[in-house]
Image: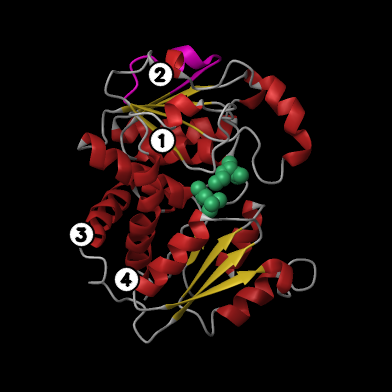
Amino acid sequence: MVRHFLKDDDITPKEQAAILELASEVKASPYKFRPFEGPQTVALIFDKTSTRTRVSFTVGVADLGGNPMVIDTGVSQMGGKESVADTARVLERQVAAIVWRTYAQAGLDEMAANSSVPVINSLSDDYHPCQILADLLTIKEHKGALAGLSIAYVGDAANNMANSYLIGCAMAGMHVRIGAPAAYAPAAHIVRRAEEIAAETGGSVTVYGNPEEAVVGADVVTTDTWISMGQEAEKQQRIDAFAGYTIGSALMAHAKKDAIFLHCLPAYRGYEVSAEVIDGPQSVIWDEAENRLHAQKALMIWLAKHAH
Ligand code: CP
Ligand code: NVA
C-alpha cells in the first residue's frame, strides 16, 4: 500500500524517529541514496508562493537521482479547470511522487485518494509537516535528543505551523507549550489529538493565554508569521490582535539560558520576532532552513521504500 504524508501523524512516532535518523545519514552522505534513479520525475506543485520549499525539494529530488518538475498551478489546468482527482490520475502514470503546496487540506486528501504514488503536503492551510521534520532535526542536532524537551510556540496558534508543532512535537515526546490570544488558540480537535499522542510518548500539551507563561523554562522558542498566505486581507486586525506577542529579548529571558530560537521563515522582523532575537546568538534559523533539504530527502527515500 502506498504511503502519503499529508499531516504529521500520517507516520507513527517510531517512523518519525526513523526518518530523522535517516535525515542525519543523508546529511552526512548527500549523494548516497538514489531512489529516483532513472531519472524518475517528481511533481512539485505550487498553489502558493515559496522560496525554501521550492529550492529544497528541487535540490533534494535531483540529489536523489531524480528529475524535479515544478508546476505552478496558475499556468496549469489545475484549479477551476480540471479536478484534483483527474490531475492525480494523469500524474500517477508518469511521476514517482507528488509534492503539493496548497490551500485546503481536502485537496490533498482527494489527490492522495486518487494517486498510486506518494503524495506529500508541502504546506496547506492546516499543516506544514515537512517543516516540522526539519525543525525536529535541527533541535536534535543542537540538543542531542528530543523526548522530554519543552518547546514554546508563541503567536498565531490557529495556523498550519502551530498545528504541526502540536502534533509533530508531541509525537517526538516533547512538551508543547502554546502562548496565544484566545481568538487565535489552536482548534480543540488538534489539541485533543496532540494530547492523545503525548499520552503515549511521554510528552504534554499546555495552552496559555499569554506569551510569558508559555516560554518559561523552554528549551526551544519558536513562532511564525501572524499573517499566513491567504490571510492578507486580515492584516491590520491580526497585527492588533497580536500586540504584546513579539518575541524579543525580554521574552526570551524567560526561557532556559541555552534555549534555541526557531522560525520556519519567511520572518517579519518587528512583528512576530525582534531583529535582535532572530539575528542573535540563540537563533538557529539557517540550520533549520538547510535542514528542510535533508529531512525531505529522508522522507522521500522512506516513502519510496514503502510505496510498493
Ligand atoms: N518555510 C517555508 O516553507 O518557506 P517557503 O514558503 O519559502 O517555502
Ligand atoms: N504560516 C505560514 C507559513 C509559511 C511557510 C503561511 O502559511 O503562510
**Dot 3 lies on which element?**
helix
Q: Nearer the viewer, mark 1 or mark 4?
A: 1
Under mark 1, the amino acid is Leu
Name the residue beneath numbered marker 2. 252
Asked whether, in this view, residue 307 is left or right of residue 75, the answer is left
Find residue 28 and name its label: 3
Q: Nearer the viewer, residue 4 or 287?
A: 287
Look at the image and tell me whether residue 4 can be seen.
no
> Which region shows up in magenta?
206-219
Say which residue appears at 74% left-offset and 75% top-offset. 77
Q: Residues within 10 Å of mark 4 (few under 14, many from 20)?
A: few
Q: Tell me which label, 3 or 4, sits earlier in the chain.
A: 3
Q: CA distance from mark 2 to mark 3?
A: 32 Å
Q: Tell me which label, 1 or 3, sits earlier in the chain.
A: 3
Q: Are marks 3 and 4 in contact (CB under 8 Å)?
A: no
Name the residue beneath numbered marker 4. 305
- Quick check: is 88 in the magenta stretch? no
Name the residue beneath numbered marker 1. 262
**Dot 2 lies on which element?**
helix
Say which residue appears at 73% left-offset and 33% top-offset. 235
Q: Residues within 10 Å of mark 3 (few under 14, many from 20)?
A: few
